Image (tube, rainbow, N blue to C red):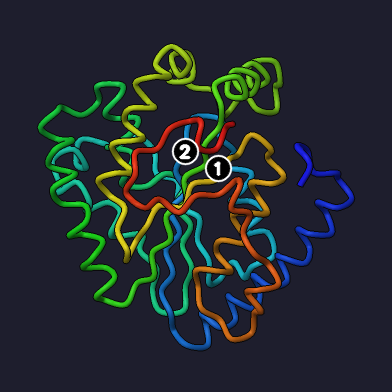
Amino acid sequence: MEATLARKAYRKALNDLQIELVKVQRHVIAHGHKVLVLFEGRDASGKDGTIKRVSEHLSPRDLRVVALGKPGDADQASWYFQRYVAHLPQDGQIVLFNRSWYTRAGVERVMGFASAEDVESFFRDVMTFENLLIDAGFAILKIYLDISREEQAKRLARRESDPLKAWKSSPIDAVALEKWQDYTEARNDMLERTSSIASPWLVINADDKRFARLEAIRLILSEIPCPLVDQHQYPRDPSRTLKFDGEIFSNSDLHA
């Protein structure tokens, strides 16, 4: 695949993959499955755009996109996972989280919004929490969109100059590059401590937004069993997607 996917080829591939996604959703609805897809990644890694392409042609009655804001006082005083439980999918539903409980292992940790004790408590509990969900019949897919430092700098600069993207800007953006190494270390720790056979992290090189969107859909098609979809027809690209297997992850793994 070329470094930048041509628009015409991208449109054709996206259309084909979105048709398959509709088949997956019909299967989820028919069999009462509960599907949970978590999208994590650095600031400006393309989560919004990717989620938009995933959800674009799916039935809104059976799909929800969850993007929670800053926790309030009641949230702060409650069990950390409690506010996420309220948004879990019901039978026949797909829920896409635009950032999830893993915010504690990333932004909250790096920015000092959570104490070291809070972070360690999260790591002690998170896999138990996810295993309880899996035992209760939830399918969990964890996708991390990773970008290079150079690409992040370009995208953050475009946010500042584009009035249509002003809503994306936040005070956290201003220090994203400054704290690049801190975010890298937090990401590596998160991947190492929260990836399991039952709920592994799938990491996508998202420097090419078009590729990342297509690859995210391919991952969903490959990870959610559906007899209506020929998974071999839509293989993931191993040169740009990693299934985290417990090894220390570095930028060079996807950004050669």
Give the residue number, with chain letter if any, for mark 2.
41
**What residue is rendered at 68% in x and 59% in y?**
56
Foreground of the two, 244 or 227: 244
Q: Secondary structure at mark 2?
A: strand
Question: Which residue is disc 1 drawn over?
Answer: 47
- Point out residue 75 in the picture as x, y percentages from the top left corner: 22, 42
Image location of residue 12, percent across then percent down: 84, 59
Q: Amino acid at mark 1?
A: Lys
How many residues crowd mark 2 within 10 Å: few (<14), some (14–19), many (20+)? many
Disc sitting over residue 33 in the figure: none
Please state which amino acid type lies under the numbered disc 2: Gly
User: How would you rate the neighbour count of disc 1 (Cα within 10 Å): few for under 14, some for 14-19, many for 20 or more?
Assistant: many
Of tags 2 and 1, the one toward the viewer is 2
Single out the residue that lies furthest toward the right. Answer: 8
Position of the C terminus by quadrant: top right
Front residue of 248/135: it is 248
Answer with mark 2 or mark 1, whichever residue precedes in sequence.
2
Q: Position of residue 113 (x, y in %)?
A: 25, 25
The x and y percentages for residue 70 are 34, 34
Examine the image and state in which quarter residue 254 appears: top right
Residue 104 vs residue 75, the one in the foreground: 104
Q: Is residue 2 left or right of residue 86?
A: right
Hey, which quadrant is residue 87 in on the image?
bottom left
Kindly check if marks 2 and 1 are in contact, taking CB atoms under 8 A apart as contact. Answer: yes
Secondary element at tag 1: helix
Left or right position of 252 against 139:
right
Classify residue 4 as left or right of residue 106: right
Q: CA distance from mark 2 to mark 1?
A: 7 Å
Residue in the image at 49% along x and 49% along y: 242
Above or below: residue 102 compared with residue 255? below
Residue at x 68%, y 20% (from the top left corner):
158
